Amino acid sequence: MMRTITVSAVSLGLLLTVGAAKAVDETYMGFQVGGLELDQQGQEETIEPAMVVGRLGGSTGDWLMFEGRVGTGLSDDTQGAGGDRVTVDVGYLVGGYGILRANVSEMLFPYAIAGGTLIDLDVTGDAGIDGSETSFSYGVGFDARVSQSLGFGIEYMRYVDGGDYDLDALSVGITARF
């Protein structure tokens, strides 16, 4: 029941994000490739799968933006030896976020991002990790435009904070504005 409520809330957030993106003058879409770092409570080793994320968003002015994301795993990672081996891959990621952007110049835009994420991890082995997690997410990044419609960026994001594990991502991406 809780999973149904969570999926419904995140889906509603994404629909509102897409609706907001249609009502503004600057709409963008793009993708990111990210290296993840999963730190379990009480474990020394980190697990580092990779994922790809599609992004769709828009601005409501010079400094406030809204964005929806959908992603999946690119590669898994295995840690441990023998019977204690654990393999983790990203099944899917869905999220809705608000972004505060600073306009440093016409080409550079640092930002802070925060919102909610629903992530499902495919876990093989006894990791003590529940497959699905919903969490408040936050991060920082910057976009650099190479033209009016094309930009590149880098971002650090904490997708899952607290619980049985923390999940961080360092991502690079490309964005097209229209």
Image (tube, grey):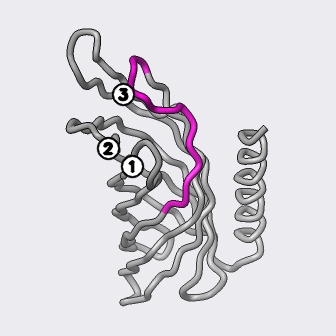
Whole-angstrom CA distance, mark 1 to mark 2, is 5 Å
- Give the residue pinned by disc 2: 39
Q: Residue at x 37, y 72 (%)?
A: 142
Residue 69 percent across, percent down from the top left:
58, 53
1 vs 3, front mark: 1
What type is the residue that disc 1 sits on? Answer: Asp
Q: Is mark 2 on a helix, strand or loop?
A: strand
Can residue 92 be seen? no
Q: Which residue lies furthest to the top in this view?
A: 82
Q: Residue at x 31, y 44 (%)?
A: 37
Mark 1–mark 2 contact, CB under 8 Å? yes
Q: Between residue 84 and residue 124, name the one nearer to us.
A: 84
Q: Which residue is drawn at 26% across and 38% down?
A: 46
Where on the picture, by quarter, is residue 38?
top left
- Give the residue pinned by disc 3: 76
Magenta stretch in the rendered image: 124-137
- Give the residue pinned by disc 1: 166
